[in-house]
Amino acid sequence: MGLRNLCLGAALVVAVSLVSPHWTAWAADALPQVQLNADSIAPRQIEELTGRNITRDYAYAWQTLAVALDQNRPQLLEGYFTGFAKEKFARAIADQKKNGLHVRYVDHGHKVNAFFYSPNGDAIQLRDNAQLEIQVFDGTKMIRQEQVGLHYLVIMTPAADRWVVRSLEAVPNF
Amino acid sequence: MKRALSALLLMIVGVLAAAGAHAAELQVPKQVTAGNAFSIPTTGSGSATFYLVGPSHSAKRQVKLGSGIEVAEDEIRTSGRYIATLCSSDGCESADFFVAATNPAHLSLLVHPSRVRVATNNAMSAVAFVFDKFHNLVLQPVPVEFHITVKDTPAFSKSLNSSNGVAWLHLNSARKEGPAQVVASIQSDSEKRVVQQVASDACNLRIRAVRKGKFIAVETEPVRDCSGNSVPDGTVVTFTKVDASGKTTVDAPVKRGVAKVDMPAQGEATISVASGVAMGNEVRIGGTP
């Protein structure tokens, strides 16, 4: 009986692993979960609506970044990235394309702490504790897969109708 | 049957263990400085494929095992996390490392607002972002010197250490109108912005009135704010006349520093003036002789 259950379990694992590329592709398209905490923000308090918009737009930024890096589509960066952040990720995607690589982020959520909001509301700095699964592909062959908790230091600035990421940098710790 | 399944399970465990053995880490430094080339040692013989995936760069190339893999300075110019992977016939080994910004080289300065009223506390703010030569945010504290100059006023300076790449301060506007030059500087760069300081609300409004037949000509003295700065032309001044016919209000813009108006009047009249929240004096004009 125990052995039968074991076999069934193994079959289930095999079945899940066969369909997993589809699941992960779907996950890359889903809006990541972002929790924003602005309790210790300074020197200016963040308005409730602004906080909601930043949370939403940061989630969209990660969603578009994940798809852009997975499908090598730099034009997707236009929506939620600007300045050096956009240039840097666009260069990475150009290199990926040239070398036949792509990187898939399976996003398991972001705990974001907003700590600096400029006096005139034209820049906000965030610390993001992100839980990610990162898969690096050479063509269709996965050469690296990892589940990681990463720290990101982020600068966002307001654009015409949304907040956009101006800097997104992984750091060893905060 | 049971034996065969057990053997299969053992095989699976063996394969997984072997896969685990290939996952031994490459010997890479935990952290390097942006733009500083380094080498990753390898062992063994034959060829392998080396991959480097970073925030602004991805590379793939063939390397010879047993010799070092050179990571060039232009491959690690962007700060952030990199994944190095080496794939040979034995499988793939990976390691990650961080690239940190190099020395501060550039500043980006935001100063707001572009126009500000004189003599107002915390009316302006200056926010400086510190970057290295590759435009990475420099996270180490860097002294940033803020220098504010206004014509005919002593200059103001303040030095602040950046925190997470940012240094900022609030500034009071000067009592005298005119451009305020805000300069932020680090050792290798400086950025300048100009804020126009303009007169504040009118203050100490004074009028004089003269009867001219059926009209009373009313004119302000030069309209200034409480610091003595002339208010800009176009500032609206409101004249109110009360006479036997009732109350009349006329708005007039300041032109060349003064506002004036001719108001019809019957008999004695009392005329007062205001601009914004500032009230002026009141004058009485006698009736027609």
Image (cartoon, coloured by chain):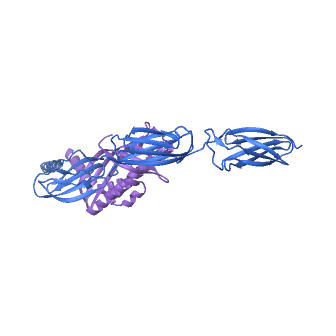
Q: Which shade is chain A?
A: purple
The reply, left or right, for residue B251 in relation to residue A115 is right
Percent position of residue A108, x then y: 34, 47
Q: Residue at x 39, y 59 (%)?
A: A76
**Residue A110: image x %, image y %?**
37, 45
Which corner quadrant holds the C terminus of chain B? top right
Q: Quadrant of residue A15?
A: bottom left
Chain appearing in blue on the rendered image = B
Foreground: B191 or A89?
B191
Mark yes or no: residue A45 visible: no
The answer to whether any part of residue B247 appears in the image is yes
Q: How many marks?
A: 0
Q: Name, please, the residue furthest toward the right.
A: B289
- Determine whether, in the image, residue B81 is placed left or right of residue A51: left
Q: Residue furthest left?
A: B45
Q: Nearer the viewer, residue B224 or A87?
A: B224
> Residue A167 placed where, x, y %?
38, 49
The residue at the far front in this view is: B152
In the figure, is residue B25 to the left or right of B284?
left
Q: Nearer the viewer, residue A31 or B194?
A: B194
Tell which of A159 and B115 is nearer to you.
Answer: B115
Residue B248 placed where, x, y %? 79, 45
Q: Quadrant of residue B249?
A: top right
Work out which residue is located at the far top of the displayed protein and give it.
A40
